[in-house]
């Protein structure tokens, strides 16, 4: 028996392994799709780079996924979604979903006060993409750049005293910034692929009643809904059928990708194909 949607190829792109948190949520929801995942590990981090560079890297990356037959693209990287979505869409003949809109949707669902805090990379914050997406939904947003969190997570320092101290400082700065703008946030968006791994640490530090939002699950729901419009191959979970293997691609460090990626995906990664996208 063939599961509906089992021939659908979904390309998931991130600057590194962080987007595997989105892939994990997608696979939980659409287990029978064929997934292609590309982490541009040679050129990470994107979060400290300029818009032009991020757009060039992201377009080169999605072109590769398209060449591999991707029929739907999920830009799991918040930074690429914030700064390069128009360029990616212009380069793609297939539908593209970014994570900023889905994060803002989740914030809208979670916030009662209408005010939200966003934690993200420096480039994402500078783009004000979350603020714009929140404003479109009638929300006010206060954004805080947290540049130390990606390297700490990459280092595996998740439940670590140094990371806890860094989080305390960023959260205090985020609270002060929101107060400065006369906002009363009751939802905190984890606006970077790496932050969901720090979710329980963050939840332990935020005030009671503050909803901590990881947009991975919301993104997976949005993909499911959108696919109903893309084709008549409606992917559904049939439970008993084997999941097709995921094809992993990276631009550097296959062994590191496997080791670190297995933590983000929450299952072992056996094989990663190294590709060269140029400089
Ligand atoms: N994937 C990036 C994001 O979600 C974080 C890592 C990076 O800076 O490249 O913003």
Image (tube, rainbow, N blue to C red):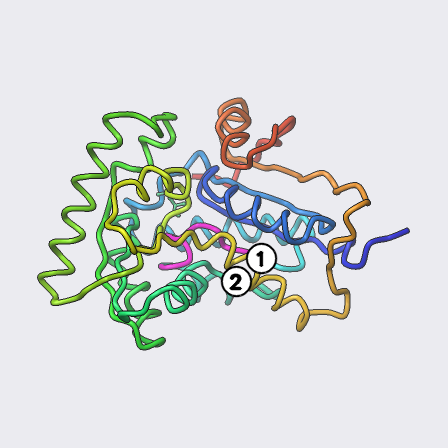
Residue 96 is situated, as x and y percent measured from the top left of the image, at: 55, 63
* Residue range highlighted in magenta: 74-82
Q: Position of residue 6 (x, y in %)?
A: 78, 53
Element carrying mark 1: strand
The foreground one among 41 and 169 is: 169
* Residue 12: image location, x then y, percent: 56, 49
Q: Which image quarter: residue 110? A: bottom left
Give the quadrant of ligand 1: top left
Determine whether 186 is above or below 138 in the image: above
Q: Residue at x 43, y 67 (%)?
A: 105
Residue farthest toward the front in the current orientation of the protein: 208
The front one of 2 and 61 is 2
Indicate the quadrant containing the C terminus: top left, top right, bottom left or bottom right.
top left
Q: Position of residue 36 (x, y in %)?
A: 64, 45
How many discs mark residues in the rendered view? 2
In the image shown, does 201 or 68 lie closer to the viewer? 201
Kindly identify which residue carries mark 1. 73
Residue 103: image tag: none
Q: Is residue 90 magenta?
A: no
What residue would you read off at disc 2? 97
The correct choice, above or below, for 256 with respect to 91 in the image is: above
Is there CB contact under 8 Å for labels 2 and 1?
A: yes
């Amino acid at each position: 028996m063939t599961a509906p949607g089992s021939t659908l190829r979904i390309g998931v792109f991130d600057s590194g392994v962080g987007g595997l948190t989105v892939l994990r949520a997608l696979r939980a929801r659409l287990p029978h799709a064929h997934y292609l995942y590309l982490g541009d590990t040679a050129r990470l981090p994107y979060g400290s780079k300029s818009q032009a560079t991020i757009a060039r890297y992201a377009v080169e990356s999605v072109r590769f996924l398209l060449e591999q037959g991707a029929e739907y693209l999920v830009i799991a990287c918040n930074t690429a979604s914030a700064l390069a979505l128009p360029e990616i869409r212009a380069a793609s003949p297939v539908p593209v979903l970014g994570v900023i809109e889905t994060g803002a949707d989740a914030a809208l669902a979670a916030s009662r006060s209408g005010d939200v805090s966003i934690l993200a990379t420096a480039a994402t914050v500078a783009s004000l993409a979350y603020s714009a997406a929140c404003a479109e939904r009638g929300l006010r947003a206060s954004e805080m750049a947290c540049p130390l969190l990606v390297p700490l997570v990459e280092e595996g320092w998740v439940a670590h005293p140094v990371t806890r101290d860094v989080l305390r400082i960023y959260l205090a700065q985020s609270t002060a910034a929101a107060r400065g703008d006369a906002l009363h946030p009751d939802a905190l968006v984890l606006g970077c692929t790496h932050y969901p791994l720090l979710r329980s640490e963050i939840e332990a530090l935020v005030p009671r009643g503050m909803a901590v939002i990881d947009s991975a699950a919301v993104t997976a729901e949005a993909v499911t809904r959108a696919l109903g419009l893309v084709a008549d191959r409606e992917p559904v979970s049939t439970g008993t059928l084997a999941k097709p293997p995921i094809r992993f691609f990276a631009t550097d460090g296959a062994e590191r990708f496997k080791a670190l990626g297995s933590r983000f995906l929450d299952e072992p990664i056996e094989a990663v194909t190294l590709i060269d996208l140029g400089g």
